[in-house]
Image (cartoon, rainbow, N blue to C red):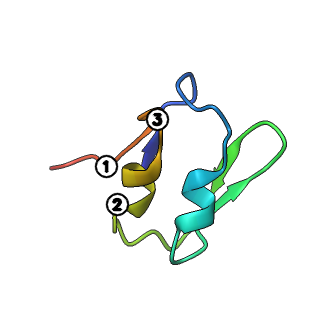
Amino acid sequence: MNLITEKCGLCGACASVCPNNVLELEENEIIQKKGCDNCETCTIVCPLGALFLEVG
């Protein structure tokens, strides 16, 4: 998962749906811990399109 910080509204939607609890909403940023399995759940729920998976 990749994050475009300029687009992120810090709503926490991605962190709340992550099945592996890899994403965490801190005060002023989204923290990505190890363990992402590229399920794309976070990219689907992000209302601002700030998350994406790199293909290739």
Name the residue at the bottom extreme: 20
Looking at the rendered structure, the kind of residue marked 3 is Ala
x 43%, y 44%: residue:
2
Q: Is residue 45 left or right of residue 30?
A: left
Name the residue at the top extreme: 6
Name the residue at the right extreme: 27
x 45%, y 68%: residue:
36
Looking at the rendered structure, the kind of residue marked 1 is Leu
User: Looking at the picture, does residue 49 appear above or below residue 7?
Assistant: below
User: Looking at the picture, does residue 54 appear above or below residue 17?
Assistant: above
Q: Secondary structure at mark 1?
A: loop
Q: Position of residue 1 (x, y in %)?
A: 41, 52
Q: Position of residue 7 (x, y in %)?
A: 52, 25
Does residue 33 show up? Answer: no
The residue carrying mark 1 is 53
Does residue 51 show up? Answer: yes
Mark linked to residue 40: 2
Q: Nearer the viewer, mark 3 or mark 1?
A: 3
Q: For the residue carrying disc 2, how many other residues have a C-alpha within 10 Å: few (<14), some (14-19), or many (20+)?
A: some
